[in-house]
Amino acid sequence: MCLVITAFAAVITTIVWYFKASDRKIRLGALALMYWGAALMWLVDGFFAVAEGEAFLDLSANDALLGLVIVLCGLVAWVLMLLLADPKKVFRSFLVRN
């Protein structure tokens, strides 16, 4: 399920990035690359699982929870990137006023 969840997040983020490509300040491309990297990682993990005689996809609840945690970690990393870059200059204007 990790592969399915991260690939779904990667596809959705890529579609949003494609239609919002004019607004480069929010760095959706970086978020999409994070999710595609995670999906590629789970794809390789699936190939190694098949090589060891296991199933390609693990459909357990724990694996689904792991996929959701990975997507959440990507969102947290993306938000931190946005806060550090401060594309709308919100924090800089606050600091200058005080």
Image (cartoon, rainbow, N blue to C red):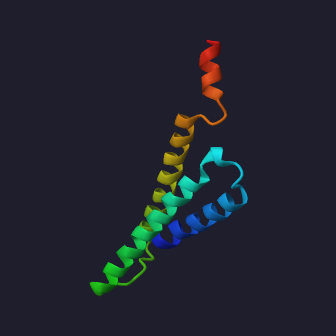
Horizontal and vertical percent position of residue 21:
69, 55
Vertical order, 71 against 76 (above or below): below
Camera-side residue: 66 or 93? 93
Of all residues, the one furthest to the bottom in this rendering is: 53
* Left or right for 1, reference 90: left
* Left or right for 32, reference 2: right
Residue 47 is at least partly visible in this image: yes
Horizontal and vertical percent position of residue 36:
50, 65
* Left or right for 16, reference 69: right
Q: Quadrant of residue 41?
A: bottom left
Horizontal and vertical percent position of residue 92:
60, 24
Camera-side residue: 25 or 52? 25
Vertical order, 60 against 68 (above or below): below
Q: Quadrant of residue 43?
A: bottom left
Horizontal and vertical percent position of residue 74:
49, 53
Q: Quadrant of residue 96?
A: top right
Q: Residue at x 54, y 50 (%)?
A: 75
Q: Residue at x 67, y 34 (%)?
A: 88
Of all residues, the one furthest to the left in this rendering is: 52
Q: Residue at x 72, y 60 (%)?
A: 19
* Left or right for 22, reference 43: right
